[in-house]
Image (cartoon, rainbow, N blue to C red):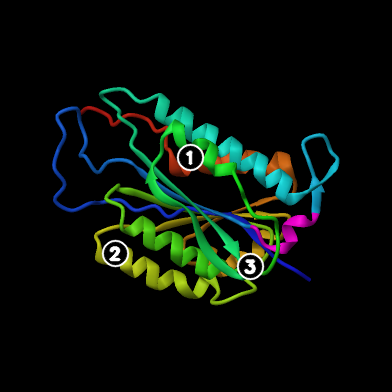
Amino acid sequence: MSYMPWFVAWALVGCVVGAEVHPNGGSPNDGVALAVVYDTSGSMNEPVRDEAGKLTSKHIIARRALQAVVQRLDAFVASATPENPRRLAAGLYLFREGRAREFLKLAPFEPATRAAWNRDLPAPSGGTPLGQALELASRALLDSPLSRKHVLVVTDGQNTVGPDPSRVLPALKQQAADKGAVLAVHFIAFDIEAKLFDPLRKQGVTVVGAADEPQLNAQLEFILAKRILLEDEEPPQTP
């Protein structure tokens, strides 16, 4: 049986020590650093139900979901104001020849670059190096000066190549702590039992399930709005 995730992506880090304060509020390091790991392993050829209820290959559904995420990030940046600049850096990671690879380097997210997120993505093949992908994405995030660092993983299977993510996560959390940061990871179990990721859940990882395209889209919106972009947060109360 083949396994695989497609999307990883995202670790949350806060608390940059000694940050300069901006006159418009916040520090120049306030913002979101987001790493998306897009799974291109072989099981993405398998079908699940799409929005119309038809059986469709998961990699086709994944491409549509990735495009929706890019549009969501674009809207987030476009809604910036002088008082709320909404700084965002994003990067895309995928699997090739059984290894995690950087596809788009973590960099400031700009509308001019959004087409690159769906351009020349490789066809699904090979295994699922989830642990490698988590390490690669997290290292890029921990090098970013932005205070809110996220890894989001969308997977339809467990790790099949290299170290398991539950084994590499403790060291990544320690590296974040050494930088005065807190690492938060979010997993969407796509067409797989979410309980299989209980070892990650026990380490504080958000784990949710999605059986088909509608549920995948709903869970992505939940993670983006409530865990990563935090657009719906109430403003701080004035004493």
Q: What residue is disc 3 on? A: 128
Residue 19 is inside the magenta segment = no
- Residue at far right of view: 54
Task: Point out the image quarter for the C terminus.
Answer: top left
- Real-space CA distance between mark 2 and mark 1, rounded to the nearest whole angstrom: 23 Å
| Front of the two marks 3 and 2 | 3
Using the rendered image of the protein, determine whether residue 154 is visible from the camera's viewpoint: no
Q: Dot 2, how many residues are within 10 Å of its Cα: few (below 14), some (14-19), or many (20+)? A: some
Q: Quadrant of residue 123?
A: bottom right
Callout 3: helix, strand or loop?
A: loop
Specify the amino acid type for callout 3.
Thr
Callout 1: helix, strand or loop?
A: helix
Q: In the image shown, does 133 or 233 lie closer to the viewer? A: 133
From which residue to which does the magenta span run?
40-46
Q: In the image shown, does 94 or 152 lie closer to the viewer? A: 94
Horizontal and vertical percent position of residue 235: 32, 29
Horizontal and vertical percent position of residue 127: 66, 69
Q: What residue is disc 2 on? A: 177
Is the residue under label 1 in contact with that under label 2 (CB below 8 Å)? Answer: no
User: Could you tell me which residue is drawn at 59 percent across and 43 percent down?
Assistant: 119
Q: Earlier in the sequence, mark 3 or mark 1?
A: 3
Q: In the image shown, does 117 or 77 lie closer to the viewer? A: 117
Horizontal and vertical percent position of residue 149: 37, 51
Q: What residue is disc 1 on? A: 226
- Real-space CA distance between mark 3 and mark 1, rounded to the nearest whole angstrom: 27 Å
Residue 43 is inside the magenta segment = yes
Specify the amino acid type for callout 2.
Ala
Using the rendered image of the protein, determine whether residue 238 is visible from the camera's viewpoint: yes
